[in-house]
Amino acid sequence: MKLSNVVVSLSVAAAVHARPAYQAHEARQLSAPGVLDEVLLFDGLAVTDAAGNTRADVSAYVSLRTPDLGIATAAVTALLSSLGIPVGNSLNILQDRLKTVASIGLPRKKVEISVPGCANKATLPSTSIDDLGLSNGIVSLGRCGGARETEATVSPGLFDSRRFKASIFSSANSGFGVLSDIDDTIKVSNVLDRIALLKSTLLEEPKAVPGMPELYASLATSLNSPQFVYLTATPYQFYPFLNRFVDSAYSASKGPILSQNLTIVDIPEAIEFISSSNTFAYKVSQIDRVQALYPNKKFLLIGDSTQADPEVYAASARKHGGFVSCIWIRQVEGANNAPERFAETFLGLDGKFRVFSDDQIAGLADIDIAGGAC
């Protein structure tokens, strides 16, 4: 049985049980998440405007609480088995990765966040039917303290002591930033090998690309605490484990993860998203999003050669000029690393890009990005 059918069945069943909650006369009372709901609050970016007020780019996902993972786990286990991939001792990891995949997103929910040290609470736009549980907005937090990282909190309300939390990373509209891809740039994902990609996504603890945590820690110092932003084509359903990975393996260079919206997902579709080279428009739009928040920052863009990172970054450099200070591309074995590809892609961007191999990672820390080198 195709897993998409399982997910759709779960969605339909949840909708039937939840239908009374969306009667018009009850919509107002039920607009805030309640005891039967779960909130996934994503780490976000923030900037202080000319008036001294902090604007934050915040996203949240609201779903039914405690999805039944039995059906989804059985379906995915069968799928993996058919591909010759045994789950073995990784059942707990698999179930953790499936929690958000198997969840049922809820429309018409409003999420209110509070941030210690900020004058205002902020309410995100209602979660939409089209995005089924997702909401994103630029919200004003008023005047805030000067902390670079603060904790946003969602309190569901009466009779519910749970607190849903995420980090807000505040940075000036000046100085430097680092925008980095995740899969096969900082995390070993094996995007070019479907079987290995399934294992790394569903069954294995994430592993950092050797040398990259140390490089990013060095950049955090040499660029004077730049704002790190992580960009991935991986669907947001896998955000929780990626977020834990970045927070632990890249603790010296923490930052929010911008992940792709895939509203109803089955595992083959999710893997197709991750491994697809058709990520150009999405990634360009997310770089546009960061540039709109920090038009006066200069960013070092770091990616790899497996998909379209070179083409995405080159397009953004041409589009935004000085916003892109430098581009680094990690050569991944088995990818298209032909010199002709990079020559054509970066035509006219001489001095603004570098293609590096793994044995060159350590030496990248010696490059004076702040001084204009690349």
Image (cartoon, rainbow, N blue to C red):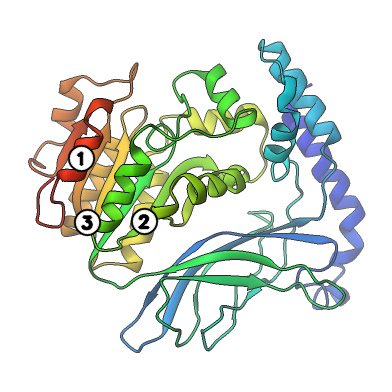
* Sequence-earlier tag: 1 or 3: 3
In the rendered image, the quadrant that contains the C terminus is: top left
Amino acid type of the residue that numbered disc 3 sits on in the rendered structure:
Ser
Q: Which residue carries the number 2 mark?
A: 228
User: Residue 4, position in %: x, y?
Assistant: 72, 31
Q: Earlier in the sequence, mark 1 or mark 2?
A: 2
Residue type at mark 1 is Leu
Secondary structure of residue under mark 2: strand
Q: CA distance from mark 1 to mark 3?
A: 11 Å
**Residue linked to disc 3:** 222
| Rendered image quadrant of residue 153 | bottom right
Give 62 or 149, whichever is nearer the viewer.
149
Compared across the picture, whether 240 is left or right of 296 comes to: right
Q: What crowding class fits label 1: few (fewer than 14 Cα within 10 Å), some (14-19), or many (20 or more)?
A: some
Q: Is residue 97 above or below residue 78?
A: below
Q: With 344 as the anchor, is 291 left or right in this view?
A: right
Is 176 or 276 nearer to us in this picture? 176
Residue neighbourhood size for the residue with mark 2, other residues' Cα within 10 Å, grouped as few (<14), some (14–19), many (≥20): many
> Disc 1 designates what residue?
364
- 176 sits to left or right of 183: left
Q: Secondary structure at mark 3?
A: helix
Mark 1: which secondary structure? helix
Q: Residue at x 49, y 63 (%)?
A: 44
Question: How many numbered circles are shown?
Answer: 3
Residue 213 place in picture, x, y as percent:
37, 43
Q: Tell me which corner region of the image, top left, top right, bottom left or bottom right, holds residue 35.
A: bottom right
Q: Residue at the location (38% across, 60% down)?
A: 289
Q: Amino acid at mark 2?
A: Phe
Q: Give the Cα distance between marks 2 and 3.
A: 13 Å
